[in-house]
Every structure is written in C-alpha cells, then in structure tokens.
Image (tube, rainbow, N blue to C red):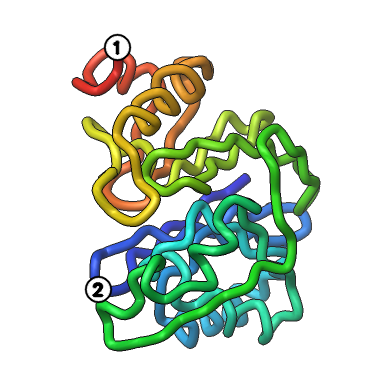
C-alpha cells in the first residue's frame, strides 16, 4: 500500500489515501475538507476510490466525506457507536464553524470487523475515549495503523469533548493499540507519523 497524506482544514487534519499501486484502487481515510482539491488529485492520478473510512465523527475529519462519496459513488464506513455523533451537529462540533453537518454512514462497523477493500484486509479496532465510537483501522499485511485522534506522536487525543473519557482513552491506547507489533507504522489524525514501538518507549501516556 502506498500512503499519501493531505493536511486539510481549519485544524490541520491529516487525510490519507491508501493506494493499491497495482490496481490504483484507493481507500480514503478521514476526508477532512476541500473536497474539490481531493477530487482533483484523484482524477489527476487516475485513482479508483472504493471507500471512505472515518475514524470518528468530529467535523474536522468529515467535512469532505459526503461530497467525495457522492461524486465517486462509494460507501462511507464508520463505527455504529459513532452514528449519533455523526448525525448531530452539536456533538460533531460542526456548530463551532457555524455549520450544521449531519452525516449518515453507509456502512456501520463493529469492533473486530474485517473488511476487504482495495485488495487488502482492514481490521477494525474500537478505541473509545476521544469519542465513544472512535475506531482505528489496521492494515495488518502492510503493518499500518490509522489511529485518528486516539494516538499521536508523543501524546494522545483530547478526552474533554462530547462522548470523550480520559480513562477509557488510556485503556484503548494501552490495552488495544500497544498490543500491536513495534514496527507498526501509525498514521494519526494530526501531526507526524510514528510507530507503535516508538510510542511504547517514549509516550508519557503509555504505561
């Protein structure tokens, strides 16, 4: 899998393209904003989008999701635990932008689900804490984790927003993500990529 990163939106959110280089089938993770820019890049590279994956429902991760899904006729995947937050502007915080964004996912996911997209298996890991329905996506074959706002380089996500809980977040990080191999590359929702091993050794929130 080839990973392309696009930093978008008002709080510099990472949107990722996970591209099968043989087929150009592309999974879009957290299309944060600027749908027209992402669509232009997809068309310029003659990519073949197959799905949008959402790690959670905060506005800064979903602003371009609907437009991209409609444009390319592809499904939007999210945790079933996140459905209410995605559909409620006061919970997904889009009201802070003066917008009322309500997004209904096409496909609802559960913990430990495995979905096959772009020729690879994607493992779903429910990691509540930043939000109650936050999930991470593990591409086990490629040793890649998309961690959303659960785990960052050197820190973890906020837990003071709607449906967040710090103890739950720390439990998700320590008892779910830290069970992964050290050489798993972590692509977070904001900031630079890291590895599970680096976070295990240096992150003050890892115990």
Q: Residues within 10 Å of mark 1 (few under 14, many from 20)?
A: few
Total numbered labels: 2
Q: Is residue 76 left or right of residue 157?
A: right
For the N terminus, give its image quadrant: top right
Q: Which residue is mark 1?
A: 207
Q: Nearer the viewer, residue 121 or 44?
A: 121
For the C terminus, give its image quadrant: top left
Q: Residues within 10 Å of mark 2 (few under 14, many from 20)?
A: few
Q: Residue at x 49, y 61 (%)?
A: 30
**9 lies above or below 7:** below
Residue 181 percent location from the top left of the image: 52, 16
Residue 165 percent location from the top left of the image: 33, 39
Which is nearer the N-term, disc 2 or disc 1? 2
Mark 2, mark 1: which one is toward the viewer?
A: 1
Q: Nearer the viewer, residue 14 or 56?
A: 56
Task: Tell me the number on the disc at residue 176.
Answer: none
Task: Tell me the number on the disc at residue 10.
Answer: 2
Residue 28 percent location from the top left of the image: 58, 62
Q: Is residue 6 left or right of residue 74?
A: left
Q: Quadrant of residue 94?
A: bottom left
Q: Residues at badges 2 and 1 in contact (C-beta under 8 Å)?
A: no
**161 lies above or below 137:** below
- Structural distance between the alpha carbons of marks 2 and 1: 32 Å
């Amino acid at each position: 899998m080839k990973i392309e990163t696009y930093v978008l939106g008002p709080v510099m959110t990472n949107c990722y393209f996970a591209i099968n280089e043989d087929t150009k089938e592309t999974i879009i993770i957290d299309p944060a904003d600027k749908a027209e820019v992402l669509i232009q890049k997809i068309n310029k590279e003659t990519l073949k989008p197959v799905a949008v994956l959402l790690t959670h429902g905060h506005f800064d991760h979903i602003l371009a999701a609907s437009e991209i899904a409609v444009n390319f006729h592809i499904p939007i995947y999210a945790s079933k635990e996140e459905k209410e937050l995605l559909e409620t502007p006061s919970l997904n915080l889009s009201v802070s932008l003066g917008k009322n964004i309500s997004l209904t996912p096409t496909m609802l996911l559960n913990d430990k689900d495995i979905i096959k997209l772009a020729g690879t298996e994607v493992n779903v890991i429910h990691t509540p804490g930043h939000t109650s329905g936050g999930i991470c996506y593990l591409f086990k074959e490629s040793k890649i984790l998309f961690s959303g706002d659960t785990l960052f380089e050197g820190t973890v996500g906020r837990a003071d927003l709607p449906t967040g809980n710090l103890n739950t977040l720390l439990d998700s990080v320590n008892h779910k993500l830290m069970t992964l191999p050290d050489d798993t590359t972590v692509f977070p929702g904001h900031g630079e990529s890291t590895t599970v091993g680096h976070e295990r050794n240096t992150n003050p929130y890892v115990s």
